[in-house]
Amino acid sequence: MQGRPRAVVAWSSGKDSAYALHVARRTDVVEIVGVLSTLTEGLGRVSMHGVREELLDLQVSSLGLPCTKVWIPVSCSNELYGTRMGKALEGLRATGVSQVVFGDLFLSDIRAFREAQLATVGMEGVFPLWQRDTAQLAREMVDSGVRAMERGAVSAGRDHETGENLYPSLELVRLTIPRRVYTQAHMDVTAESVIALYENCEKVVGLRFTHEPKQLRFFQARFEPVRGKRVFTG
């Protein structure tokens, strides 16, 4: 499809930016040509979620997109942030990128700040998740395959010597809840989902790998259902 604006995604390494990328690709309104991520100097981590740079690189590699990295100090003033981000945006604009996709939902002051900064270099913001009904959005994310962070057998990996799967004593799921981002509707959906899982626990089946990557398998692995006592089989 010709004529679509070239865009990059503001990549926080979290699910909202990932889903914004998914929606932008699905709607085909813009041509996604890369991601833009802010990292903290001296820590080597994504400033928003604290993800290590090497994990960010693996995420970006799986996306098949180049990443523009903006480095800022631990205590970064708005002025310095604006200067460094502005320089990165100018560089992207010079390559024909005219839009930046964000995963923001509700914070109008943050959106206004982003749009004002983009306007200084002749760019525009795209907000595919903006003011979406959060309960519906959460269910849509689940239906599309987005999942919480598994911290059990899949994360434990394999024994380096035998190649056998490791089975921890507990199977856990990590839910990260940043401040000022989630509404009560998100919490309601989470509680309802946990209750529904417990009430239907006897129906839960095991899983078998259909695709097992060597790295980050808890993010990138694919499974199919299988009856059995084990959580999953190799």
Image (spheres, rainbow, N blue to C red):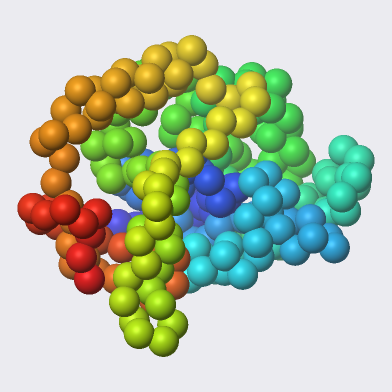
Q: Is residue 199 left or right of residue 161?
A: left
Q: Relative to residue 222, is residue 123 depicted above or below? A: above
Q: Hey, which residue is sitting farthest bottom in the picture? A: 161
Q: Is residue 73 left or right of residue 192?
A: right
Q: Is residue 196 left or right of residue 220?
A: left
Say which residue appears at 64% left-offset and 22% top-offset.
180
Q: Is residue 4 left or right of residue 91?
A: left
Q: Relative to residue 75, is residue 2 depicted above or below? A: below
The quarter of the picture where residue 185 lies is top left
Say which residue appears at 28% left-offset and 45% top-offset.
145
Q: Quadrant of the N terminus?
A: bottom left
Q: Position of residue 39 (x, y in %)?
A: 73, 56
Say which residue appears at 75% left-offset and 63% top-offset.
44
Q: Hey, which residue is sitting farthest front in the picture? A: 169
Say which residue appears at 69% left-offset and 35% top-offset.
114
The quarter of the picture where residue 228 lies is bottom left
